[in-house]
Image (tube, rainbow, N blue to C red):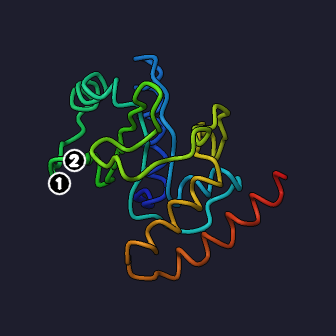
Amino acid sequence: MPTLSQTEKQLDILREIGDLFEEIGEPFWLRGGWAIDFRIGRVLREHDDLDLVARLSAEQTIVGRLEAAGFESLFINEKQTDYRKNGVDVQILYLTHNEGGPLTPHGIPEWVWMPDCLDPRAHELNGVRARVLTPQQLLAEKLDYERIGRPKREKDTVSKKLLRQLINQER
């Protein structure tokens, strides 16, 4: 019996997560490598995990639904709990938008995000629909990681080139 590839398993989990978020009436956005794939409309490489962004105001509802659906909680630190199901790791970064203040990841107020980074349009890839952060925000994140000293990775170099191309195409 053939086994599903990591890519197929991740897309299946992403479809399931999309259904769960739709049921609770909350949006989410992809970030990282999958976000670029969805923006381009094809899978460019295999990914380690699914990186999502959601609103902090929905965190408890999201956690409850994920756990009820069989996602295992993986405590990372005080700022981060990841999830795993069927061998697929899912990271959710919760964003907060203080009244009159900037959009920031919860617990990291110094990491200010672009006010228009949450693209409301859904993109489709292999029958799965998802919202995706803007290419500008995805590129800014890659550049921020460089500034804080994250080791250079070949996939980041490729991603930055693709994101710059997407930004230029959208102008």
- The residue positioned 29% from the left and 55% from the top of the image is 87
Specify the quadrant that holds the N terminus. bottom left
Q: In which quarter of the image is residue 52?
A: top left
In the figure, residue 129 lies in which quadrant? top right
Is the C-beta separation of discs 1 and 2 under 8 Å? yes
Residue 159 coordinates in the image, percent (x, y): 60, 69
Mark 1 to mark 2: distance in Å?
8 Å
Looking at this view, is 106 or 59 the one in front? 106
* Residue 31 image offset from top left, x and y in percent: 50, 51
Task: Looking at this view, name the residue that lies furthest to the front.
Answer: 100
Reply above or below: 129 against 36.
above
Above or below residue 106? Residue 136 is: below
On residue 76, which mark appears? 1
User: Considering only vertical position in the picture, is 39 above or below 73?
Assistant: below
Q: What residue type is labelled 2?
A: Lys
Q: Along the horizontal axis of the image, is 90 left or right of 119? A: left
Badge 1 amino acid: Ile
Q: Element under label 1?
A: strand
* Residue 146, horizontal then vertical, whole percent: 46, 74
Q: Out of 15 and 34, give the one closest to the viewer.
A: 34
* Residue drawn 47% across the image and 38% down it: 102
Q: Name the residue under label 2.
A: 79
Q: Position of residue 165 (x, y in %)?
A: 76, 65
Residue drawn at (46%, 64%) of the image: 47
Q: How crowded is mark 1: few (under 14 residues within 10 Å), some or many (20 or more)?
A: few
At 41% across and 53% down in the image, what residue appears?
111
As rendered, which of 93 and 72 lies closer to the eye? 93
170 lies above or below 131: below
Q: Which of marks 1 and 2 is in front?
A: 2
Label 2 sits on a secondary structure element that is: loop
